Image: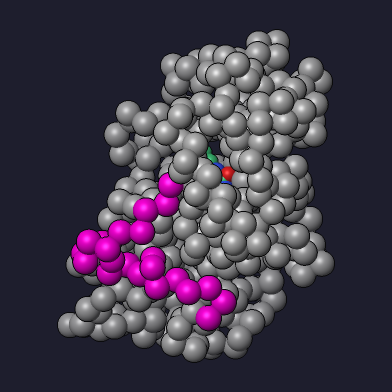
Amino acid sequence: MTERADIIVVGAGIMGCSIAYHLSERQAGQIVVLERDRIARGSTAAAAGGVRLQFSTATNIELSKRSMDVWENFEELFGTEIGLHQHGYLLLLTDDEQVPVFQENLRLQQTLDVPARWLSPDDVRALNPAVRTDDVIGATFCPRDGWCDPYSATMGFAGAARRNGVDIRQDSQVTSILRDGDRITGVEIGDDVIEADLVILCTGPHTSFVARTANVEIPIQPFRRMSFTTKPFPDVPSTIPFTVEFARGLYVHPEGPGFLFGMGDPDEPSSLNDTVDDAWMMTTIEALCDRFPPFINAAVHTGWAGFYEITPDDNPALGYVDDVDGLIVAAGFSGHGFMQGPAIGTCIAELVLDGEARAVDITAFSPGRFNEGRLAQERNVI
Ligand SMILES: Cc1cc2nc3c(=O)[nH]c(=O)nc-3n(C[C@H](O)[C@H](O)[C@H](O)COP(=O)(O)OP(=O)(O)OC[C@H]3O[C@@H](n4cnc5c(N)ncnc54)[C@H](O)[C@@H]3O)c2cc1C
C-alpha cells in the first residue's frame, strides 16, 4: 500500500511527540508519527525525569529554560498531571579540577538568569542531610531544577497532537528511509510506503541505524544506563534535591515513598543490551551508601535499563541533514533529552515553517558539525 503525508515523524518518544504536537499547533499539514513499539517506551521510558537549567553551554541553558516554562505549566496547558517536583538539582564536587569549571558554568548560568548558586559543605548538609561531605569541596544548586514523570509528559504531548489531527501509529517500524538522489521521498514500513517530502528522525539511540538506510551517517551511539528504586524509606527526608555526585555520575532523588538512584558505567562499551546487570547494581548500591550513608538501611525495590544516545560532544544532532533535501534529525541528546522536549518541539516546528528556529538558536547543534569538526562540548553531563 502506498499513502502520502506532508510530514513523517519517526519515533514517538518525548521528541517525536513534542515535535508532532508543535507542528500540528501551527497547522503544518498532514502529520504521521510512526513508532515501532508503543508511545514513550524507548529511552524516554527509562529516564530519571530530571529537569534542570544547570548546563555549561548557552544553547542547552536556553533550551532548558524554555522547556522549564512549559513543565511548570504543563497541567494547565495539556490537562495532564506530570508530578513536577522542584526541589532543585544539587551537584556535589569532590575533585579540585571541577571547581573552576563549575564556577565558570555558574557565571554563564547567572548571566542567563538561571537562579543557580555556589554552596559550601555546610549548605549542602542543610539541603540534604544524607550526604557525606568530608571530601566535598563545594556544590552548585539551582532551586528551579527538579524532576517529573516522562511517561505522563510524553502522553500529554501525544494526546494533544492527536486532538489536533496527528496520526500516531504504534507497532509501525520504519524499515527504510526512501531517497531519490539528493531528495528524501518517504519511508518504507515493511511492504508499505508512505511518501512525504519531509521526514523527521526522532529515533533516539537507534538514529544512526535508521539514518544509514538512506546512506546518511549520524554519529549517535547507544550506551546502556540503569536506574533503581528503593522500597519506601523514611530515614532520608523526601524533601531532598535531585542530588548528584558529579565525579562518579551517581544520582538520587525522592520517588514516591522511596528514592530513585543510578550511576553510569564509564567503561561499558556501546551496545543494545538493555538487561539489568546485577553486578553493576551492586556497584551502584555501594557508591550510594558510600556517598549517602543512611541508605545502608534501604532495600531495592526495582531496576531497569535503557539507553543514553551519545554523540561525540554530548549534544544532539538537531536540524536539517546536509547534502540531502527533506531530512531533519532531532536525536542524540546524550542523556539529557527528556527535559528539553518542549523547547525542541517549538524549535523544530519553527525550523520547518519559518526556515529557522527563533525560540532558541540551535545552529550550534546542527548535524553537519560532526563532519566539519565543529564540536559543541557539553560539560555538565551526568
Ligand atoms: C537511565 C536513564 C536515565 C535518564 N535520565 C534522564 C533525566 O533525568 N533527564 C533527562 O532529560 N533525560 C534523561 N535520560 C535521557 C532521556 O531518556 C533521553 O535523552 C530522551 O528520552 C530521548 O528521547 P527521544 O524521543 O529522542 O528518544 P526515545 O525515547 O528513545 O524515542 C525514540 C523512539 O523511536 C522509536 N524508533 C526507533 N527506531 C524506529 C524505527 N525504525 N521505526 C519507528 N520507530 C522507531 C523507538 O521505539 C522510540 O520509541 C535518561 C536516560 C536513561 C537511559
Magenta span contains residue 363 = yes
Residue 121 locus on image (x, y percent): 66, 26
Q: Quadrant of the N terminus?
A: bottom left
The magenta stretch is 358-379
Q: Is residue 133 left or right of residue 194?
A: right
Coordinates of residue 26 in the picture (x, y in percent): 61, 86
Q: Residue at x 30, y 51 (%)?
A: 312
In the rendered image, which quarter is residue 68 located in?
Answer: bottom right
In percent of width and height, residue 5 lies at 45, 84
Task: Pick whichever, 159 or 74, lies toward us.
Answer: 74
Residue 364 shown in magenta: yes
Is residue 332 in view from this perspective? no
Residue 322 visible in the current orientation: yes
Q: Position of residue 187 (x, y in %)?
A: 34, 73
SS majority, magenta: loop
Residue beneath the point at 22% across and 78% down:
323
In the picture, measured across the screen, residue 374 lies left or right of residue 44, that is left
Q: Check the image and report above or below for 322 versus 99.
A: below
Q: Is residue 154 above or below residue 318?
A: above
Q: Does 186 appear above or below 72? A: below
- Examine the rendered structure and indicate whether residue 250 appears above or below residue 205: above
The residue at the point 55 percent across, 19 percent down is 135
Q: Is 225 in front, or is 118?
A: 118
